[in-house]
Amino acid sequence: MEWLTDPWSSEIMRRAFAEAIVMGATTGALGCFVLVRGLAFLGESVAHTIIFGVVVAFLLGAPAALGAVLAAAITVGLASALASDRRFSVDVAMGVLLPAFFGLGVTLIALTESYRSRLQDTLFGAILGVTDLDLLLAAGVAAIAAATLLLAGKELVLVTFDREMARAMGYRIALLDLLLFAVVTLAAVVALRAVGNVLITAMLLGPALSARLVTRTFWPMVATAACLGALAGIVGLYWSWSSSVGGGAAIVIAISATFAVLAAAGPLGRLARRRPGRPGAVPEEASC
Amino acid sequence: MRLILTIVAAVLDAFDPPFMQRGLLVGLVLAVPLGLVGTWVVLRALAFFTHAVGVGTFPGVVVGLGVPAVGPFLGALAAAGLITAAVAGVERDERVRGGAVTGLVLSTAMAVGAILLTSAFALSTPVDAVLFGSLLAATVDDVERAAAVAVVALVAVLFLSQRLESATFDRAWSASAGARPILTEALLLGLIAATVVVALPIVGSLLVSGLLVLPAATARLMAGSASTMPLVASALAALEITVGLALARELDAPPGAVICALAGLGFAGALLVERALAARGQPS
Amino acid sequence: MSADAGEAVAVEGLSVAFGARQALSEVSFRVPTGAFVGILGPNGAGKTTLLRALLGQLAPRGRIAIERPVAYVPQLTGAGSAFPIDALGVVLMGFFPRLGWWRRPSRTDRTRARALLDRVGLANRAGSSFDELSGGQRRRVLLARALAQEGRVLLLDEPLAGVDALSRDLLLRAIHEECASGRAVLMTTHDLAEAARVCDRMLILNRELIAQGTTEQIFTQEVLRRAYGSDVLVLDRGIAVLDDPHHGHAESSRWSG
């Protein structure tokens, strides 16, 4: 049973495991909201535009996280503005913002000698290089996410599945949307350390997709996604430890493999899946 | 005026070396399908699909580079075909609308590519070139392939444009009138995949979607009909690729990034001009 | 089975099932040329399914004899409105099926398209973006497109719902002109009173055919009750009070006898 305990003897791996478990659970849980609201392309776009924010922050000597969050905010703002123009769908708005900002970001990185070498890490993550500070941030974000779900969970679910009802009940929809967006962005920014910009979409969507195949209502889905996210992190890192495969990539493969297996076990999944029209059941993606 | 002349002179200068000229040739030929196909990507909201196909070619190119018998082109082609079929099949299912499975698929493709890169193949081509394009990558074969796709795109769009127009505007009527929108749409997806594959050497997997979306989106601001959009989009693509390649050489930055950054600025510029004209009360 | 000389549509034993759900069951009817038929029924009665079957989009049991091409005006969706096209362009689409989808419309076609726009009162809006037109104007343009198809049969899906008065009048005038020149027009509607006002024949559908015939024959208490349940009350020939459980309000209207 040595292979089970071996990795834990390494301090680097212990940190990596901690990061993977905490971020896997957090992004897995929050990803359920991203999934249900059909925000996959938005998530992917934000992940890419964040690079621009990080580089600019680096050049200005500001903290990277600040640049990331600002870039995310700008992306969402511009996306809404563009999509409100009838000539452009939300899809095209993302299709414009992603390459434009990503291109700008990569160009800046190419011009910045000290950053060029970090491009690969930025794209694919460097979970084995996780520091105590990273772990602290991860724990912090996880706490924020948990608190948000505990305190505002019901409201967030209402706004997600029945906006009209929420509006009628007097909830400030814009505020709740903003809260959700802020928490998801924070989680994404911190998770970038583990898996990098091009892989983070898997961490947000994969566990949620898998969970949806085996649960019928929303909160069990969230819990299942959190567990699957953490589990995939552990499995991925084991694989990474025993081979030359990078940590981030390994985790993503673990996530996708889980989904593929569960999806292929179709009949079982279909039995457990929700019936349409039930309140509290997991309906189709609502658009935000 | 003098500024423009200086820029033009600098750009022409940049294309002295043969490799730059090859790159430019590929780019200019590419402008044709980029404008034609990009128009429909924008009008039919296929940007996410295009991005997924682009990113999905990454593992294919890695395999192609690692196995010389296959080569990057065939590797990209196979990967593009696979992803097109997968995403098209998945997105038809209403249960998973919203692109979630597409998002997972493209992330997985990146992961697979990264793993192949580090463990299976030791490549002489740097990863940057695959992801963001390279000035040195364009070969004569690439020019020929781009030309082939350009011709196919021209003929196809000529043949399909009225079907596409009616299916996009009113799918229900189009089907009732015998236009077979499903077939038309499938052909369009194939065209997108082909265009993506031949544009890869210049701009790389991660940014190729920008080339299909940005010039066409800018054209949407400027052109009023589905028949003039492709012309404007192609012209913009040609301009942005030309200046982008020259600038990329100057800055020693990957061409894909520079071209997309330029194209983004072009879009922003067109938007601002339109706003300014509207504020002054003039028709755009 | 084929349609008789004076018939535009003949349907026999039409049944359509989607999985376990029976959408239409043994529907049979005939439509003479020049008729204006209202297809009525509550929500879920199978009206749209019937239209799709008539358009040849389904593979149902039973037989349908209908002269193709069948011109079609679908319900308005918001989807098409973001497409860059002007009113003339939309009408020109109506020529595509006959031209073959790759041949461009000729100058003559453009003139004919303008004439069709004129028929629906939009001659001066030929160059307007479809986007900019009001709901009623858009409906008129879509009718002009259907007229361009020059089918013997014209199918309209809820053409008058929520349309302004002027558009309604122009739409009905064009429809009556078509009927006068021998085309059969079938329109689905959930507006009972409206159908009674403008159609000369009716089909009442609720998965099966409840009744068919001329308006006078149909608009009786027993027929309506069979179709809509006990929610219909015909007070006298001039007024019908309809309490529609699906809309939850009472609607009264008058038609001239």
Image (spheres, grey):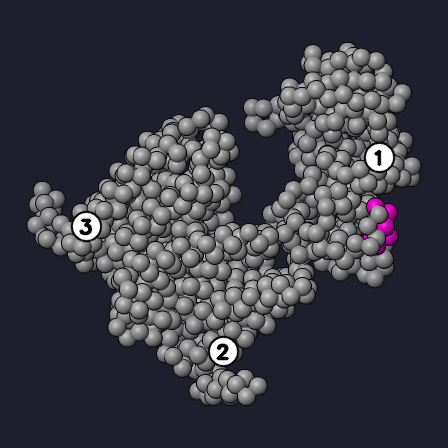
Span shown in magenta: C113-120
C118 left or right of A227?
A: right
Check disc 2 and report its element: helix, strand or loop: helix
- How many other residues sit within 10 Å of disc 1, few (<14), some (14-19) or many (≥20)? many
Tell me how far mark 1 sits from mark 3, CA to CA. 75 Å
| Mark nearer the viewer, 1 or 2 | 2
Q: Which mark is residue A136?
A: 3
Question: Could you tell me if residue C8 is visible in this image?
Answer: no
The answer to whether residue C156 is left or right of residue C8 is left
Reply above or below: B7 against A114: below
Report the chain holding disc 3.
A
Identify the residue under disc 1. C184
Chain identifier of the residue bearing label 1 in the image: C
Q: Amino acid at mark 1?
A: Ala
The image quarter containing residue A121 is bottom left
The chain letter under disc 2 is B
What residue is shown with label 2? Answer: B243
**Above or below — where is A259 with respect to B232?**
above
Query: Residue flagged by tag 3: what amino acid is it?
Result: Leu
Image position, residue A212 (x, y; %):
37, 35
Q: Residue at x 44, y 26 (%)?
A: A279
Q: Is residue B127 magenta?
A: no
**Observer-nearest residue: B198 or B266?**
B266
